[in-house]
Image (spheres, rainbow, N blue to C red):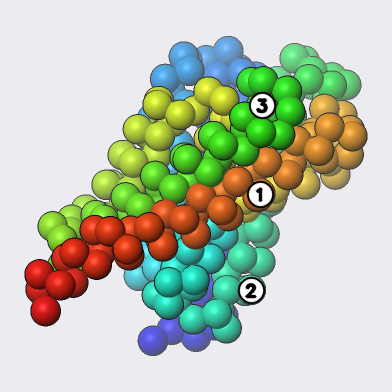
Amino acid sequence: MYSKKAEFLAELMGSMFLIMFGCGVVASVNIGNNGAPVNIHIAWGLAVTFGIYVSGKISGAHLNPAVTLGLAVTSRFPWSKVWYYIVAQMIGCFVGAAIVFAVYYGKWIEVDPTFSHTAGVFATFPAVPGFLYGFVDQVVGTFILVFLILATGDANNTPAGSNLGPIIVGLIIVAIGMSFGFMHGYAINPARDLGPRLFAVIAGFKNNGLTDGSNVWLVPIIGPIVGGVLGAVIYDFTIGKALAKKTF
């Protein structure tokens, strides 16, 4: 059993590494013109993998408010810890974005000196204008994420070994990105999107989806929360319930 401070720092550090690798590869491709879009899918999967390795032993490596809430709603996680897990995830994602910006700053001011069109390095934006299409995309993507996390980690199912779990979750991210990454950039994580987006606002990015009047930021907050809770609840009422009956 670890202290609240240890859990808080573990979630913060895991989330920071998540964004360093995740937003880092987007910056590499879009700011540095280095690599192809497939690099983004693979590196985001690895970002999640290493974020879990960083914090998994101490905090369980949620790294995502949608995961935290899905686990809490289904009584897998105490509600008393939800608030500081989410705060830690937000801070870690914000710090990770700041580090990426610092590393790429020299090239950034060549490519977009007025910060008018590159906020997409930090946050997600819709392929089709409006709320509905992106919302559906985020609900489905996060549903898949949480459902498969539970399925591959369920002791009553065929779980991956403890040391392989992070790799499996990383592969889930790669699959979601390649299959459902188009409509709204597969944030599937409110902290992953809002933390870096807040940094973009503070750094002066104009097309940030938060202060530009577009309200884009709402989709990757509301959609993942709904999808994450649905993923956990539906898992319990389908596969989880069947496995429990067979076992007991």
| Residue at 11% over, 79% down | 248
Which amino acid type is shown beneath numbered disc 1? Ile
Viewer-side label of 2, 3: 3
Asked if marks 3 and 1 touch (Cβ < 8 Å), the reply is no
Q: Name the residue under label 1.
A: 221
Q: Of label 1 and label 2, which has the lower sequence position?
A: 2
The kind of residue tagged 3 is Pro
On the image, the x and y values in percent for residue 164 come to: 21, 53
Spatial CA distance of label 1 from label 2 is 15 Å
Image quadrant where residue 41 sits = top left
> Could you tell me which quadrant the N terminus lies in?
bottom left
Task: Name the residue at 38% across, 58% down.
Answer: 234
Determine the image quadrant of residue 101.
Answer: top right
Q: What element carries label 2?
A: helix
Q: Position of residue 97 (x, y in %)?
A: 66, 43
Judge whether 126 appears above or below 88 on screen.
Answer: above
Amino acid type of disc 2?
Trp
Residue 64, image x, y percentages: 53, 56
Tell me which label, 2 or 3, sits earlier in the chain: 2
Residue 90 in view here: yes
User: Mark on residue 83?
Assistant: 2
Residue at 43% x, 77% y is: 75
Q: Which of 202 and 214 is in front in this view?
A: 214
